């Protein structure tokens, strides 16, 4: 590689308080190259992109564009330097029509029109208000708007997510031609199929560091998975926990039985069972439909198809209170969603007690205090600052959200990434607690973004990719590499030489039935 | 997030006082009330006597009940601007119907618009998610319009104030205003509801984090509908009490109390953003506003200057109080 890189970032670091989002990231993009940026959840992809496009400032590092040091202080500066991002969220202003949106960014209209046609939307009316345009089309318009100003480096963040197949195909085609015409593209994606079809090289991030730059050749996906996981492969093998006994004796009716569940465009066709006394893990990359799955099971949103059965009875939830009545409690990943921050620990735990209309009367203070105190003791919540929940540490807040449902004696608990952003000690306590709950014949559905937690806590694990269950593992086989591969839609047990890299037409989302 | 509560550290006297105030938000309010009374006594020696006290309490009570409506609605992040109209309607209907009807029937007729407006407010805010400010302002205007139409139909028959309301509104027993017979149980009931019932807990929870309440199984529309009906009922009762005090039914009888009732709740430490506050502070807030009004009246300023001063003092007191009580 003798050509000079168009974009060359080295030693980029960014700290948020004590947390290092990026430690030592580098990225070098050659002219005419489509370059994949890869990494597991939280590896620092979005932080790096935000730094390159001027949305946030790096604490350290150097960015060279065409060999010159550029200090990108704002998105406008990035634009002047020839760097243009297309984010996952549509960026047109919803209340303006398309034409006004173009004027706002000084985008030339004719090239835009040409690109829109090129991308497979022949009949766009520029007078349409952005709000009335479907999401998939908006994303394409974002891309066309970026292409119209002919950027040197185009940054595409999960460009094909939420696009129907025909549009996605057009988009990929245009991106490939962009590379052929000497411009560069940084392509962020979770989909190996696209990356293999499109990209020349890939930079892999792990824990805020660039751990490798690889050429995309058939079979390289194993290497990429390895890079993304790093040393963890060795570490986790020995922490494997034998599957719970309860799960294997699942002759009885399952607590929760989900069949062909669909929610909008995000979740299509998810089926699984959750037995009494079982902890089932859910593993998925960001935005694969797991949020919708949990929200549908919790009664927060209505599924667009499929059935949910609780103890063999079909249920239809229209409000979280319906789910709660069926014994299903939802612990959201974001604690600020679950807690009344200005209220006391006691009140937060006792909140579900008063929810029903017939419980609006006088509170039986003594009885309630006993129940709440036992839940607090059970979770060992540090109640020195119990006057207001917002004064508690993150770990203790998370405990309060779980204690609430233990006090309410919920039989099924849906935990969405309960250990996100809390200290190691509390994490251990939560693992222990979830196992204890299973021991008490309660059922737990446990989504986690940290793969190593699966073998500590779960009896089985289901993997979701692109809104579908792509695999169900017994816990013994659910080590990190296997889960990571499955989470990226790679089929289990396929060896390097017949990898999907070799055959981009093979569909990654066939559902192999798990052995019961 | 402050870690001050979990970590004992050496604190200065100033911080200790602040902490004390923050833990007992009533203390600075009571101090302020006493200061105002003392100023009054200094400006006009001898004015603070038994008769003055009884009068102040009499005029503070209707304000305090309406401020109770504001406190409860504000706890959920709402507001009820229709209380003035509701109070006026029930007072006006009572005074005109008592001429021809049995007192019990007149009472029921007087409470009808209160229930109706409360229900409409509750459904509008709880089900259709209209902003409470707009919703209650709208029903308030509609109510005033209806009252004007109603007035034409009864203009011939005249009006009178029932003796019982007269007794309740202005009478004294052993120097104590009879209105306390109504107010004390009512206040105890409100405080108890907010502190010790499921409904009260839900008001705080909904105002603090509606999403969290929803995830705990709370149905927002039920809470909000019940809340606005209760608020309207309290306003209706206030109207009956107030007509006994003012003795002159008019189409804008209780309207001047609406904004002071909001001010009393805010001075009393209830946050208009919801989730924070209580009724005891509001009662003292109502007393403070009433004493303040007397104070400004005896200063013998022109009406305009008085209003300017009133507004400035309310702003200043609220800002100062929040600075003292909020630990940031």
Image: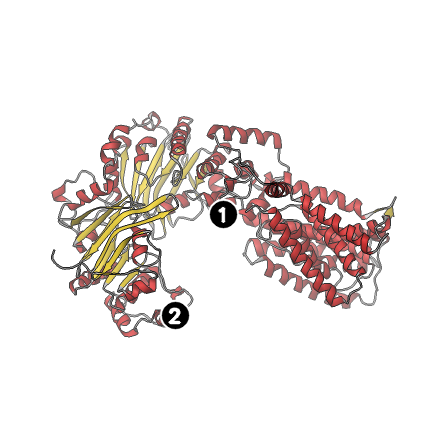
Can residue B228 be seen? no
For residue B134, side relative to residue A484 (left or right) = right
Q: Chain of mark 2?
A: A
Q: Which mark is residue B194?
A: none
| Nearest to the observer: residue A160 or residue A401 | A401
Can residue A435 be seen? yes
Quarter of the figure with residue B243: bottom right
| Distance from Cα at disc 2 to Cα at disc 1 | 33 Å
For residue A351, side relative to residue A273 (left or right) = right
Residue B203 at x, y percent in the picture: 59, 46
Residue A226 at x, y percent in the picture: 20, 41
For residue A484, side relative to residue A344 (left or right) = left
Q: Residue at x 36, y 52 (%)?
A: A264
For residue A325, side relative to residue A12 (left or right) = right
Residue bearing the label numbered 2: A97
| Nearest to the observer: residue A465 or residue B153 | A465
Residue bearing the label numbered 1: B211
Mark 2 residue crowding within 10 angstroms, few (<14) / some (14–19) / many (20+) = some
Give the secondary structure at mark 1. Answer: helix
Give the secondary structure at mark 2. Answer: loop
Residue A265 at x, y percent in the picture: 34, 53
Q: Up-down: is A310 above or below A111?
A: above
Q: Up-down: is A200 above or below B192?
A: below
Q: Up-down: is B154 above or below A213?
A: below
């Amino acid at each position: 590689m003798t050509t000079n890189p168009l974009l060359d970032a080295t030693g980029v670091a960014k700290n948020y308080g004590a947390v290092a989002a990026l430690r030592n990231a580098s990225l070098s993009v050659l002219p005419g190259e489509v370059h994949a940026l890869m990494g597991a959840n939280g590896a620092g992809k979005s932080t790096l992109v935000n730094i390159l496009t001027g949305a946030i400032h790096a604490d350290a590092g150097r960015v060279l564009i065409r060999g010159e040091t550029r200090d990108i202080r704002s998105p406008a500066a990035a634009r002047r330097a020839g760097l243009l991002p297309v984010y996952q969220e549509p960026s047109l202003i919803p209340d303006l029509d398309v034409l006004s949106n173009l004027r706002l960014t000084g985008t030339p209209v004719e090239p835009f029109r040409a690109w829109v046609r090129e991308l497979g939307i022949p009949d766009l009316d520029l007078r349409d208000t952005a709000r009335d345009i479907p999401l998939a089309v908006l994303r394409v318009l974002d891309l066309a708007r970026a292409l119209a100003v002919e950027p040197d480096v185009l940054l595409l963040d999960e460009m094909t997510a939420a696009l129907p197949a025909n549009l996605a195909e057009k988009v990929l085609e245009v991106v490939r031609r962009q590379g052929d015409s000497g411009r560069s593209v940084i392509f962020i994606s979770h989909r190996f199929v696209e990356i293999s079809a499109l990209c020349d090289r890939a930079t892999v991030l792990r824990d805020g560091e660039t751990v490798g730059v690889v050429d995309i050749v058939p079979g390289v996906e194993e290497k990429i998975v390895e890079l993304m996981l790093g040393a963890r492969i060795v570490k986790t093998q020995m922490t494997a926990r034998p599957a719970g006994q309860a799960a294997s004796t699942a002759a009885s009716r399952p607590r929760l039985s989900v069949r062909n569940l669909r929610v909008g465009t995000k979740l299509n066709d998810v089926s699984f069972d959750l037995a009494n006394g079982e902890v089932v893990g859910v593993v998925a990359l960001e935005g694969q439909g797991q949020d919708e799955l949990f929200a549908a099971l919790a009664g927060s949103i209505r599924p667009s198809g499929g059935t949910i059965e609780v103890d063999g009875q079909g249920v239809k939830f229209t409000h979280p209170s319906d789910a709660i009545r069926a014994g299903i409690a939802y612990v959201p990943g974001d604690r600020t969603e679950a807690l009344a921050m200005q209220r006391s620990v006691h009140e937060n735990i006792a909140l579900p007690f008063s929810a029903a209309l017939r419980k609006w009367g006088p509170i039986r203070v003594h009885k309630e205090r006993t129940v709440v105190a036992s839940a607090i003791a059970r979770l060992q919540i540090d109640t020195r600052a119990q006057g207001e929940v917002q004064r508690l540490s993150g770990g203790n807040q998370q405990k309060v959200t779980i204690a609430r449902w233990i006090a309410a004696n919920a039989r099924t608990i849906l935990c969405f990434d309960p250990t996100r952003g809390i200290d190691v000690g509390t994490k251990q306590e939560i693992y222990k607690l979830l196992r204890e709950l299973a021991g008490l014949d309660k059922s737990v559905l446990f989504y986690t973004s940290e793969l190593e937690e699966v073998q500590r806590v779960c009896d089985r694990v289901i993997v979701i990719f692109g809104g579908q269950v792509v695999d169900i593992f017994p816990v013994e086989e659910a080590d990190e590499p296997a889960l990571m591969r499955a989470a990226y839609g790679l089929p289990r047990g396929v060896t390097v030489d017949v990898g999907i890299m070799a055959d981009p037409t093979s569909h990654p989302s066939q559902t192999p039935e798990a052995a019961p | 997030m402050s870690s001050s509560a979990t970590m004992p550290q050496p604190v200065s006297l100033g911080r200790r006082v602040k902490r004390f105030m923050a833990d007992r938000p009533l203390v600075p309010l009571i101090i302020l009330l006493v200061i105002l009374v003392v100023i009054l006594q200094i400006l006009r020696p001898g004015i603070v006597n038994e008769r003055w006290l009884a009068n102040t309490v009499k005029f503070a009570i209707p304000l305090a009940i309406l401020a109770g409506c504001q406190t409860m609605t504000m706890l959920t992040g709402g507001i009820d601007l229709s209380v003035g109209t509701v109070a006026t309607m029930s007072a006006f209907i009572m005074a005109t119907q008592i001429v021809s009807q049995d007192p019990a029937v007149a009472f029921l007729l007087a409470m009808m618009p209160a229930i109706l407006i409360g229900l409409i407010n509750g459904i509008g805010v709880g089900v259709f998610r209209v902003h409470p400010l707009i919703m209650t302002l709208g029903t308030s205007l509609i109510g005033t319009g209806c009252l004007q139409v109603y007035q034409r139909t009864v203009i011939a028959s005249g009006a009178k104030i029932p003796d019982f309301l007269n007794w309740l509104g202005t009478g004294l027993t052993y120097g104590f205003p009879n209105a306390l017979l109504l107010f004390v149980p009512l206040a105890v009931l409100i405080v108890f509801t907010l502190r010790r019932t499921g409904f009260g807990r839900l008001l705080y929870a909904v105002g603090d984090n509606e999403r969290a309440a929803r995830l705990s199984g709370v149905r927002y529309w039920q809470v909000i509908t019940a809340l606005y009906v209760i608020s309207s009922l309290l306003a209706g009762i206030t109207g009956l009490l107030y007509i006994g005090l003012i003795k002159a039914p008019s189409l804008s009888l209780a309207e001047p109390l609406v904004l002071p009732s909001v001010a009393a709740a805010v001075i009393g430490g209830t946050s208009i953003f919801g989730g924070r506050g209580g009724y005891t502070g509001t009662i003292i807030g109502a007393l403070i506003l009433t004493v303040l009004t007397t104070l400004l009246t005896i200063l013998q300023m022109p009406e305009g200057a008085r209003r300017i001063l009133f507004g400035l003092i309310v702003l200043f007191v609220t800002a100062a109080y929040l600075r003292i009580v909020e630990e940031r």
